[in-house]
Image: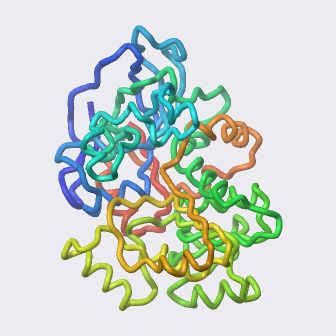
Amino acid sequence: MKAITWHGKHDMRCETVPDPKIEDGRDVIIKMTACAICGSDLHFYDGFMPGMESGDIVGHEFMGEVIETGRDTTKLKVGDRVVVPFTIVCGECDQCKRGNFSVCERSNRNAEMAAKMFGHPTAGLYGYSHLTGGYSGGQAEYVRVPYADVGPVKIPDGLSDEEVLFLGDILPTGWQGAKNCDIKPTDTVAIWGAGPVGLFALQSAIIQGARQVVMIDEVPERLAIAQRMGAITIDFQNESTVERLNELTGGKGPDACIDCVGMEAHSGYEAEHLYDRAKQMIMAETDRPHVLREMIYVCRPGGVISVPGVYGGLVDKIPFGAAMNKSLTFRMGQTHVNKWADDLLGRIQEGQFDTTSFISHRGTLEDGPELYKTFRDKTDNCTKVVLTA
């Protein structure tokens, strides 16, 4: 089959690789009908994600049609359309029973490796580093889906692939990012990063009742979409984020701040950005935490810092004293997709979310390597890439 594989920094290839096979009775094989390049994929594209190996099949945002089932799979049958959450969950361990699906205790095949890095293993993820199990990803013609009697979300007739594709990652990620904030009708919510996750966090914050939502980014196309969706926008390259947020909140600061950027943040302050890049080059830090620093500084005392953006390792110069003295609450983590999926599917059917208008580029797996570059560089007005076989 054809699949997109990783061979090092900025080296993505569409190659012919062996077809997946049923390995366990709870497996299914799906024929991929749509997949996407996620902003999180850019972390290994740029060489910042540890645990990658040359030849890894990538991609964690995908859906398709079931073509083969394992002997113990009763939830799905051949011909079912499913969206596959990016987190692989067993449904039986203590964390799954609590709804903490992204820290499933059984699905990470490389638990010892992850424990050395993080202290404890977290869930297996598709196409995303051997720290998360080394599972083949969904940017491929066919995908093996383990624990298929638990994870996949069956899609009813009448919904297109593009309407529901993002149910496997970025829609519930944005929703959880907003849910972490316990939004009240008087709240101002500030969101850093107007990419697809940020746009879903914006829509989620509005649905959850925020008084006003402020979006911070530097890409005009993204800011225009955010403004159309109801946000007040700040271009951090052309105005002060701190001053503008204080102006919008009467000097009190946002009640909640959501980091939809993660480990490759860009700072509007050249000295700060150069500092972080230099620290990365000498391996003194792995992640650029500009957004975290800025959120801690601007957030209202007693407010919430929500972090759905991906971080991979070590950060530097975090103003933790400010966070402690301002009584800030931090909530973060990979998304518990299956906790939210059924509710969000219903909301898609009711038309509460715009899930398609920001898709700017479509292509095939063969187009994928070049579209990685386009998406990463934000050229050709690229805001989101969807691929088919």
Name the residue located 42 percent from the left edge and 68 percent from the top edge.
378
User: Is 317 placed left or right of 347 in the picture?
Assistant: left
User: Is 88 placed left or right of 276 in the picture?
Assistant: right
Determine the residue located farthest toward the top in the rendered image.
Answer: 71
Q: Tell me how the rendering is colored.
A: rainbow
Residue 264 is drawn in which quadrant? bottom left
Residue 98 locus on image (x, y percent): 58, 36
User: Is 5 placed left or right of 256 in the picture?
Assistant: left
Residue 156 locus on image (x, y percent): 65, 26
Q: Quadrant of the N terminus?
A: top left
Given residues 285 and 22, the one toward you in this image is 285
Q: Is residue 150 above or below residue 41?
A: above
Given residues 202 and 280, the one toward you in this image is 280
Say how many tags the image has: 0
Residue 47 is drawn in which quadrant? bottom left
Q: Is residue 227 visible?
A: no
User: Is 170 placed left or right of 273 in the picture?
Assistant: right
Name the residue located 36 percent from the left edge and 45 percent from the top edge.
120
Q: Quadrant of the C terminus?
A: top left
Q: Is residue 312 visible?
A: yes
Residue 200 locus on image (x, y percent): 62, 56
Q: Is residue 102 above or below residue 193?
A: above
Name the residue located 37 percent from the left edge and 73 percent from the top edge.
288
Q: Is residue 338 above or below residue 373?
A: above
Residue 179 locus on image (x, y percent): 66, 54
